[in-house]
Amino acid sequence: MRFTNIALIVSLLSIMFTASACTTLAGKEEIGAVIARRAQVRSSSAIVAADLKEVVRGDELDILDSAVVPDTKELWLHVRTRDAEPVEGWIEARNVISQEMIARSKQIAKEDDGIPAQAQGQLRASTNIRFTPDRSGNDNILMKLESGARFDIVSWKRVPRPKSLDTSEGDDVPKAGAPDQSADRRKKEKDEQKETEDTDELWYKVRLPASVSPAPAGWVFGKQVELTVPSDIIFYRTGREFVAWQRLDGDVSAAPQSTPRDKDAAKDARPGSWVILEKSSDEDSNGPDSPDFDRVFVLGYDKDRQEHYTAYRSPDLRGFLPLRVEGKGDSKTFSVRVQDSGQMKDLKFKAYINERGLLKVEPLGEIPKGVKTK
């Protein structure tokens, strides 16, 4: 009899556990992070709802449920704050990102561990950050960044331009929860289609500071990015664009480059010596198989005369990222990759200050065929 009772209890517990597990999975709670600079947790999704609590970028929330507002078709989340005095309410879904998406973004960032920032940029307009360099659909959208957001650029890539987007020059996120308008958009673009010379498009892989996003990395459509070349060197462009730059003075190992928080901080950078990667703007240099850069330019700085001078300029070459600068004090090395007879080779240079106090650059080891020093 005792054995029968025990078996019955175990059976009932098993049934209760199974039912509980099904309920939990059906309405499984998630943890999200606020991506808006600031947002309100409200008493409901109604227009007249009361503001219960202000949350700021990076704050974590328990996501309890979700609902689409019939009138606006916008998605709202039922959430609970994760602080000492939790508040439960509703927030617009566009202001929150899930931890699963943040984890995917961290995986993208991990791919570039140890690679320094190659350049810096900021957004011309509000733009999507994506998991992959592809804007033909919405499935790979990570989040939206506001106009003016600044970030480090780690690498870039050219991909074929989606045929359905021949006339579209932007990449803005649709309203969360709204019906997919891609079919109507494609029809409209087809009706308004005009010839375009661009058959492919540029994408930047970016590293995002915590002040901009809780997700650390992703891809941005190139036409929405403005490179923020430091004012220290921007006036030394001579017909080619600067695509990457790193300082040669100071201790690069102790103070790695990062995007300044202040929008105008780059304008106030102190003068110094730089290694710069340049690229031509002709059609042949911008195809899917084009190099990342086609010339190395080193700019020295004379502290006594308070002026820059050309320390080195390479002939044309097929160069590829990343650019790495190593060393301390006045003696540095920097390296890139170049293509030589179809093979990729590391190209390394030594940069030092000579007895006259001028910056000199010398190649280390054998120079690949077709790459000569001046």
Image (cartoon, helix red, strand yellow):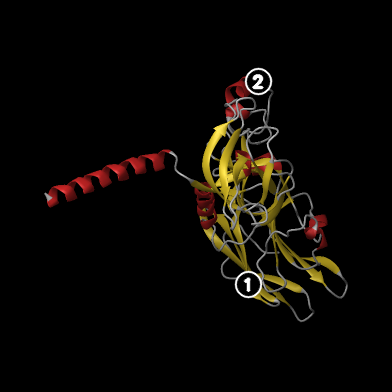
- Left or right of 366? Residue 269 is right
- Locate residue 144, reporting x and y percent: 64, 42
Kindly identify which residue carries mark 2. 188
Question: What whole-number distance in Å separates the C-alpha atoms at marks 2 and 1?
Answer: 52 Å
Q: Which marked residue is nearer to the observer: mark 2 or mark 1?
A: 2
Tell me the residue at 54%/39% (across/down).
Answer: 140
Furthest-right residue in this view: 305
- Give the image quarter of residue 278: bottom right
Residue closer to the observer: 50 or 237:
50
Residue 137 in sight from this viewpoint: no
- Give the image quarter of residue 222: top right
Pointer 1 local density, CA inside 10 Å: few below 14, some 14–19, many at least 20: few
Pointer 2 local density, CA inside 10 Å: few below 14, some 14–19, many at least 20: few
Kindly identify which residue carries mark 1. 253
Furthest-front residue in this view: 1
Residue 55 in sight from this viewpoint: yes
Tell me the residue at 74%/50% (across/down).
Answer: 240
Q: Earlier in the sequence, mark 2 or mark 1?
A: 2
- Left or right of 236? Residue 194 is left
Identify which amino acid the numbered label 2 is placed on: Lys
Residue closer to the observer: 171 or 74:
74
From what the image shows, is residue 317 above or below residue 123? below
Identify which amino acid the numbered label 1 is placed on: Ser
Describe the element under mark 2 as helix, strand or loop: helix
Describe the element under mark 1 as helix, strand or loop: loop
* Residues under numbered marks 2 and 1 in contact, where contact means CB atoms less than 8 Å apart: no
Furthest-top residue in this view: 191
- Locate residue 128, reporting x and y percent: 63, 41
From what the image shows, is residue 209 above or below residue 223? below
Residue 313 badge: none
- Locate residue 342, reporting x and y percent: 51, 51
- Locate residue 309, reporting x and y percent: 81, 66
